[in-house]
Image (cartoon, grey):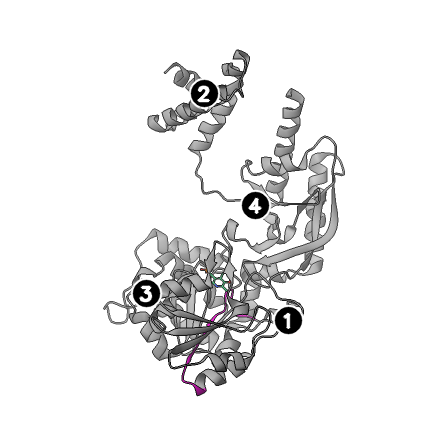
Amino acid sequence: DQTKQALFAIDQSLQELPKARLRTIIANYLDNLRQKIRLGQIKSAEELALAKHLPNLLRLLREALEPKFKRVLNATGVVIHTNLGRSVLCEEACKAVSLAASGYNSLELDLATGKRGSRYALVEDLLCQITGAEAAMVVNNNAAAVLLMLDTFCQGQEVIVSRGELVEIGGSFRIPEVMRRSGAYLREIGTTNRTHLSDYALAISDKTRAIMRVHTSNFRVLGFHKSVELKELSALARSKQLLLLEDLGSGSLVNLSQAGLPAEPTVQEVVAQGVDLVSFSGDKVLGGPQAGIIVGRAELIRECKSNQLTRALRCDKLCLAALAATLRLYLKPEEAMAKIPTLRNILCSKSELQEKAEILAAKLNAAFGTPSFQVVSGNSRVGGGAFPEYDLPTSLVELKPSPELNLLELKAALLKTDPPLILRLEQDKLLLDPRTLPYEDFDLVVKVLVLAREALISKDQQA
Ligand SMILES: *Cc1c(COP(=O)(O)O)cnc(C)c1O
């Protein structure tokens, strides 16, 4: 109780912490100290002085008052950063989410008839229009979409997949494991680097139900390498009456090769080349909310929809509101590229990046009072398993090393600022990539860097 009163005297806001929570945090802290005494890490009474521990305890308690879900500044230059929430939604989508969240809506009401409608109708129409597919559906994420396709069509039957495509993507989502969970039997063919059309043809038996193609996502095979053209596979599947399924991973709705990125087939192209069903993510290159989208032949989509799993994998109204708003922009591709942050960041011109870097470096140098920052050239990444290992040229702001500042410590300290600033430390260089920082956030970046540096320097002086 005394400790409590002492703490409240220092910081009144701590009274807002529920009593039980306060007690647990203090008890854990004391347990930790006892453990250190037992292990001989604390040797003298001096090290137990309240004055020494009060600041730590206060910090822990203040942290407990703050929400864990925080906005962060992304200076990594990784556009689709899964740890940082992948795609930032466009303004239109944010408005739609806010509207859907704050009041009742026509989610499952057909306003033309007054009867129960389908929550998916709006996004499905847009998806068909944009991709040219006969039908479309949306589930919770692309992993769910892959599971649903396999569960609906391939239970107890064989699915042929090239060994070059049996990938594990982040978060230990492994294609072979997902197949096992769906009850489909994986028939692996070819080798890690080369798979031929004849490998597929030879593996087909009366147990085969489908051929599946999987985007290799976050890795790339270089050198002696061969995979089979989609057109050839689609002809083979048709002639043997097999389904051709494709997990396109990121799945772009606009052709980004016009901006100098490596050529990757768009969803539209994959559909046009005769894939029966193709699935892709909503929050990767598409730039929308987390979702798994399946487009393809109408009778197959109908079967997926009547699978009971679909209900368990369904997405909520906030996701649908955001997805519809994002997709509407794709009706005019130039508009999508101008307004969707993910596409805008990927397509940002070299001259704009140079200008952004120069403005940011100038602001930082002015605030630090020394020319500590300089603009250097470097690379950003698309992220999210899209365009693996492909370097997007960018201009970086580099903090020059100085003896008074430990860069590792500074990077760690920036995780604790409000908001936290996430940046890159590469070969003893601290780098900020302006590609993923909007101009509006530059002053905040400056503020947190100045604060973090001051905190480190004053800590060193105390020590
Ligand atoms: C990202 C990815 C997935 C998983 O998508 P989520 O939307 O994260 O569930 C599946 N397959 C491939 C090839 C991917 O790149």
Q: Position of residue 211 (x, y in %)?
A: 45, 76
Residue that badge 4 annotates: 73
Tell me, yes or no, whether the two marked residues, 3 and 1, touch with CB atoms within 8 Å: no
Q: Residue placed at 70% from the left, 35% from the top?
A: 368
Q: Position of residue 181 (x, y in %)?
A: 37, 62
The first of marks 1 and 4 along the sequence is 4
Calculate the distance from the C-alpha at mark 4 to the C-alpha at mark 2.
38 Å
Front: mark 2 or 1: 2
Labels 4 and 3: the sequence-earlier one: 4
Judging by the rendered image, the residue that carries numbered circle 2 is: 34
Q: Can residue 252 be seen in the rendering of this structure?
A: no
Q: Which mark is first along the chain, 1 or 3? A: 1
Q: Residues within 10 Å of mark 3 (few under 14, many from 20)?
A: some
Along the polypeptide, which appears first: circle 2 or circle 1?
Answer: 2
Disc 2 secondary structure class: helix
Label 4 sits on what residue type? Leu
Secondary element under disc 4, as helix, strand or loop, is strand
Could you say which quadrant of the image residue 183 lies in? Answer: bottom left
| Residue 393 to residue 62: above or below | below
Quarter of the image for the N terminus: give it: top left
Q: Which residue is mark 3?
A: 310
Kind of residue at disc 1: Gln
Closer to the N terminus: mark 2 or mark 3? 2
Q: Are marks 2 and 3 in contact (CB under 8 Å)?
A: no
Badge 2 crowding class, 10 Å Cα cut-off, few under 14, some 14 to 19, many 20 or more, is: some
